[in-house]
Amino acid sequence: MTQDQTIEPRPGLSPNALILLAAWLAAGGFLVYAPSELAARVATFAFVILGWILAVMTHEFGHAFIAYKAGDHTIRAKGYLTLDPLKYVDVGVSIVIPILAVVLGGIGFPGGAVYLREDLMRNRWWRALASLAGPLGTLLVMIVLVAAIWAVALSPLATPGARMLCDALAFLAFLQATAFILNLLPVPGLDGYGVIRPFLPDSIRQGLRKFEGLAMVGLFLLIFLVPGASAIIFAPALMLTDVAGLPRELIQAGWDAFRFWRS
């Protein structure tokens, strides 16, 4: 190392990320010791929504980390490596559509927005890997949540409140499964398309570019307005959670508790 070379300090964890994590843990603690069933169901809603935001942060961090390793060092200045949820937010894409999808249908729509400089990445394989890293982060979150469920369920200190926490964790894990499957669809604007895009001819990439911004809305309308369309997400997502050892009855119980406004 020469005297002119400097080591860039690692980006620190954003205070916003720590606040969000603390709020999620607090919601989980309140859920376990909630004074009433209604309070527990409201806490389930808060726990799942906050947990979903944390999961989206992990997904987007995966994209950013690999893109940075691939050569896009603009990632650091954009704050994508700090896990700050505010750095990943696009009001429509990050908040409105994902929350509607969770509330209306129990589907984990992609919710973040990071802007990567593919022209700065080393080659097409790194570009494909940067797109794939997000879904892999989502899958990792699902695995961690399933492990947490079994840890709580097998604890000798398990209580009825802890069972409700397991239900909430199960529904949150299922959302990760749906998000993983959804993101891998080869649809312009989704990560599945991002994986294959670097290998497509320039003419095809340019022709599909104009559809990338509309894909999310179009897919949302398709899934929720066309009967049976949601099966393309739910069926493989349930297969994935089955393989992970997540009981379907826990997912259903978590979904029922999440919708606290329904009797």
Image (spheres, rainbow, N blue to C red):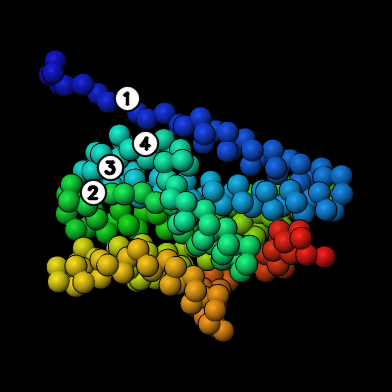
Sequence-wise first label, 3 or 4: 3
> At 58% from the left edge and 33% from the top edge, which residue is drawn?
19
Q: Quadrant of the C terminus?
A: bottom right
Against 218, residue 259 (above or below) is above
Q: Which residue is mark 2?
A: 117
CA distance for labels 4 and 1: 13 Å
The residue positioned farthest toward the right in the image shown: 36
Q: Residues within 10 Å of mark 4 (few under 14, many from 20)?
A: some
Sequence-wise first label, 2 or 1: 1
Q: Quadrant of the N terminus?
A: top left
Which of 239 and 76 lies nearest the eye of the viewer? 76
Which label sits on residue 106? Answer: none
Sequence-wise first label, 3 or 1: 1
Q: Which residue is mark 4?
A: 79
CA distance for labels 3 and 4: 12 Å
Q: Secondary structure at mark 1?
A: loop
Q: Which residue is mark 3?
A: 68
Kind of residue sitting beneath label 3: Tyr
